[in-house]
Amino acid sequence: MVGGCYAMLLAAALAAEPAAADTLPAPQRGPDLAAQAGATETLQEVWAAALACDERLAAMHAAARAAGQRIRASEGHYWPDVRLESRYAVLSDAPAYDFGTVLGLPGVAFPFAQREGLGFSLRVAQPLYTFGRIRHGVEAAEAVWGAAQHAVRRTELEVKLQAAAAFLGVLQAEADVVVARANVAALCAHEVEVSYHAELGASHRTALLGAQLACNEARQRLLAAEQALAAASAQLNRLLARPLDAPLTLAEPPPPPTELNESGLTALALQCRPELAELACRAAALRHQAAAVKAHALPQIGLVARHDYLENRFVDPQGISSAAVGADWSLFQGGQRYHQTAALQADAESLCRLRRDLERQIVLEVRLARLQCETSQRYVAVCQQAIAQAEEHYRVTAERFRDLLATHADVLDAEAARRQAYVDYHHARYDTHWAYIRLLAAAGQL
């Protein structure tokens, strides 16, 4: 009777999975966890909610927008630079030429400017040829923008991984709570049976005390499991920007596929991982910056047109326009541009080497994730067999105890083995889901 009660509670606690011919059918999640099935949230819905409210991702989007604005700023160097300068000057005295000494006429002076007046200058400078300085500046800004876009994707993967870990943590904690409740129910039923035997004189008083102690320990494990569930729920609610005590009803994720193509996943990883693309874009940006600095050391040819106006009644005309084509060439800067170019090229080479090292790390990451996924799947089958064996062992031990052929300690040991078998099965199932999610993340397909 005790074994049947425990089996019913546990059968209602675990999620259904395809059963092998020689293994115990996978238990189902109980009605207490699926009562609100119409309001359950899937992993995809949790991901969408986490991406919508994550501040790190919002910061990456803002950085990408800033990089886009820098492209527009770099393209602005193609356009004319128009400047207007104006001033209103007041002098202490009106300037004049004194010809008294030359002409021999004391006090003879000829003013050439007003004491006060308005003046302005309008200058237009249009670059004509800069040896690629502007073009490389724009391409560098575009590469930085590309790196920012890949950084957004990298942050999305990080947010999804964190949300998936919290999602599976809640499901596993829920399953642990149900197993703990079933364990309390089974041990309390065993306590009743031991008490009945003690009343008949078939069991010693110490057996009843041992059963009561085991029941209290089971209640303590239940409290610990409920606390772990509350902590896991709070962690997921934090990622979803909800109140920490908001209720959660989560749906079981679909079972991972059993066939995994490592070579195909590795090729996808090397092609799709945003970290690799981000490093490549940053290296390209540094190379373009080096080319821009190098081009700045060459003649910068441009057209300059200007109009100067000075309010002065002694001058005619008061406004003068001019236009010129000229070259600005810095011949010597103490090696500044040479060393700046060399430093930028060295930084680009550093990023390229880091990218090659990251490629090898990604290949290893895919291999380890695939091995972990396959190992976890095999471990689930082993745990199913362990559940079947633990159930049968407990059934036989309980019958022997009722027939006074087994001791109270034998029943407790059998119950502990059965509880641990279900706990191991839960953890193996969710470890399988987590390993598959890690594999998708390693391949850049999450």
Image: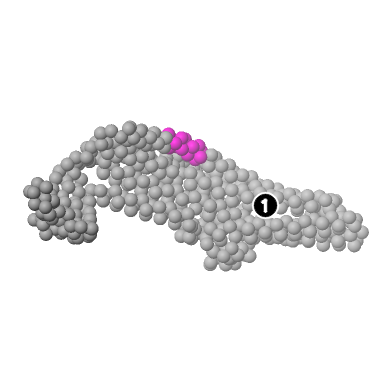
Residue closest to the eye, 62 or 274: 62
Residue at horizontal 73%, vertical 49%? 417
Residue 91 shown left or right of residue 314 in the figure: right
Query: Mark 1 belongs to which amino acid?
Result: Tyr
Range covered by the magenta-colored residues: 352-367
Q: Is residue 357 magenta?
A: yes
Q: Nearer the viewer, residue 161 or 56?
A: 56
Q: What is the chief secondary structure element of the magenta stretch? A: helix
- Where's residue 305, x and y in %? 15, 50
Q: Which residue is mark 1?
A: 422
Q: Which image quadrant: the N terminus?
A: bottom right
* 228 left or right, relative to 407: left
Q: Left of 384 or right of it: where is 200?
A: right
The picture quadrant where one finds residue 65 is: bottom left
Colouring scheme, one of rainbow, by chain, secondary structure, one colour: one colour
From the viewer's side, name the closer residue of 195 and 127.
127
Q: Nearer the viewer, residue 103 or 189?
A: 103
Residue 134 in which image quadrant:
top left
Q: Tell me residue 2's x, y (percent).
A: 76, 59
| Residue in the picture at 87% in, 55% down | 207
Residue at 50%, 45% in the rendered image: 439
Tell how many labels.
1
Image coordinates of residue 426 in percent, x first then y, are 63, 52
Q: Residue at x 22, y 54 (%)?
A: 83
Farthest residue in the right direction?
Answer: 201
Secondary structure under badge 1? helix
**Residue 312 is one of the magenta-drawn residues:** no
Dot 1 crowding, Cα within 10 Å, few <14, some 14–19, many 20+: many
Is residue 74 visible in the rendered structure shown here?
A: yes
User: Is residue 175 among what the camera can see?
Assistant: no
